Amino acid sequence: MNYLNTIFILVVAFLAVFAEAWFDVIRNLIGAQIDLLPALIVYTSLTNSIFSTATLAVCGGLWFDSISCNPLGVSILPLFLVGLAISQSRELLLRENAFAQCVLGCVASAICPLLTMFLILNIGHNPLLGWESLWQLFIMTLGGGLLTPICFLLFDRIHWTLNYQPIVETSFRADRQIKRGRN
């Protein structure tokens, strides 16, 4: 199920990047676009292998850069570094706690754009930066934090639907009569 899980994550990442580019009502309404890839990176790094995290960072970063004004490939490193940091401390983090998922999603959604902006500035491009950028960073951080538990719920539902559920059987049956003594 590990490769199938990676395929599901990549399909959701592709659909999320497509939806970000196509569905612009929220962007026009609040003035900022919510990025879904950091939330998926948090889920992937907490539940899957580093291979799945790296695959999502490369594919998701390339898909995101291909529809944005970013230079191609600049989003890969920030996504991978966030995923690597979470994956390295996976045992210390509370995977099942929704508040911890929100906090990790907020941190990942804040760090990824900042690292991407840092890389863009270092390769010589001049992005548009101003006071509105702080508003966009705030919306991206808050939206990514709120979408991270939704990612966990979505993929838990997929696992529950497609995986076999363990059957708990005991040797005691309720309809069995136990006779004691000599016969």
Image (cartoon, rainbow, N blue to C red):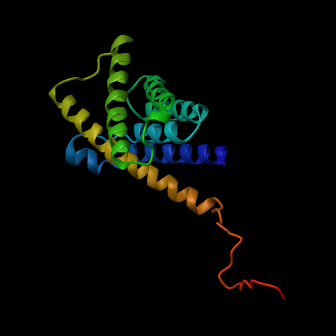
Query: Could you tell me if residue 124 is visible in this image?
Result: no
Q: In front here: 179 or 34?
A: 179
Residue positioned most to the left:
131
Q: In terms of depth relative to the viewer, which is nearer, 109 or 30?
A: 109
Vertical comparison of 65 with 168: above or below: above
* Quarter of the image with the C terminus in it: bottom right
Residue at the location (29% across, 37% down)?
141
Residue drawn at x 33%, y 46% as measured from the top left: 99
| The quadrant where residue 181 appears | bottom right
Q: Is residue 108 above or below residue 20?
A: above
Left or right: 82 in relation to 128: right
Left-right relation of 101 to 32: right
Give the residue at the far bottom of this rendering.
183
Q: State which quadrant residue 132 falls in.
A: top left
Q: Residue at x 68, y 78 (%)?
A: 173
Q: Residue at x 43, y 25 (%)?
A: 78
The percent position of residue 38, horizontal first and vertical second, equals 41, 36
Can residue 175 be seen here? yes
Quarter-of-image position of residue 144: top left
- Residue furthest to the right in view is 183
Q: Position of residue 174 (x, y in %)?
A: 65, 81
